[in-house]
Amino acid sequence: MTGAPADGAALNVAVALAAHHQAHLTIAELVNLQAPVTGPWDLAPAMAMGEVHDRLRSQARANAAKLRNRLQKEAVDSEVRVVEALSSPPPEMAVSLAQCADLSVLAGTAGSPVGDAVANAFFSELLFGSGRPLLLVPPRGKLSLPLKRVVIGWTANSHAARAVHDALPLLGDAEQVDILMIDAPAGQPDKSPDPGSGIADHLARHGIAVKLVKKASHDNPLSQILIEHAQKAKAQMIVIGGYGHSRLREWVAGGMTREMLVRSPLPVLYSH
């Protein structure tokens, strides 16, 4: 829970996923307890900060109680953890939890040209630091299960390959999975006669109904083409690899990753 407007939508999706897959759901209510900065003889700031911490802890307990009441209505094995972030920022604490899970579900900020700084910090840390897939749920985002139609934005690299593998548990019941290649290269390193045929065959061996789609960008943003195709295909989810450079992680470097973060009206599963 990040305090973003889409927290409710993300929670609904997480509950639906846990119920459908008979999974355990952990909800993290993170408390940002900033350490006071004081001089050797100045105790007043520390005392004032203590009062702030008490208020934050009280609010977190109240939030957790509301979440537990919400979950009592669901047939889901779940828990709510209040996690105090004092020595490390809340996004880093979230990474520690995510590393011990199959999937992280996070509120997105689609519709904002820049996005919420706090939500973006969680997204960046979880994507690049957890080693686990991340499902970003935009405001008003929904996920009807089992999934019927999914679009994969495919490029032959390690990030996209990991994303496809991580998405496999969600793709098994799909009626159709589109593998969308934009500006597909003429050839593949593995000498496949048709770019994209390798990943299509791989998914087909898993019993997944796949369709290979190729489009040219014509200098339009790749995210725009991917989203428009997903909407026309009536997809419920998009799958892509997450890209970035460590020195620019705070901005979630990589055009496609950042654009999908702020543009996609559909839930997006990322892996890095």
Image (cartoon, rainbow, N blue to C red):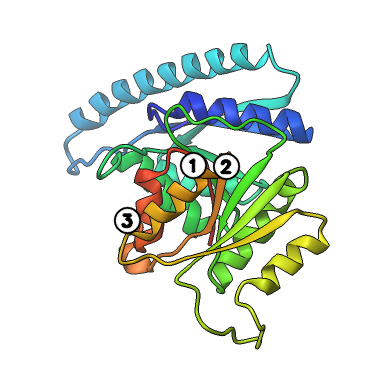
Q: Using the image as rendered, state which of residue 123 and residue 167 is in the foreground.
A: 167
Amino acid type of the residue that numbered disc 3 sits on in the rendered structure: Glu
Task: Looking at the picture, tell me which residue is in the foreground, 82 or 103.
Answer: 103
In the rendering, at what x and y percent does residue 184 appear? 50, 74
Determine whether label 2 and label 1 are within 8 Å by CB.
yes
Residue topped by disc 3: 250
Residue located 56% across and 18% down the image: 67
Looking at the rendered structure, the secondary structure element under dot 2 is loop
Q: Disc 1 designates what residue? A: 231
Disc sitting over residue 235 in the figure = 2
Mark 3: give few (<14), some (14-19) or many (20+) Cα within 10 Å. some
Type of amino acid under label 2: Ala
When asked about the image quadrant of residue 207, the answer is bottom right
Pinpoint residue 23: horizontal percent, then vertical percent. 75, 35
Mark positioned earlier in the residue sequence (3 or 2): 2
Q: Is residue 236 visible?
A: yes
Amino acid of disc 1: Gln
Give 265 or 195, whichever is nearer the viewer: 195
Q: Nearer the viewer, mark 3 or mark 1?
A: 1
Q: Which dot, 3 or 2, sits closer to the camera? A: 2
Q: Find the distance from the CA under tag 2 to the CA under tag 1.
A: 6 Å
Q: Is residue 75 above or below residue 1?
A: above
Q: Secondary structure at mark 3?
A: helix
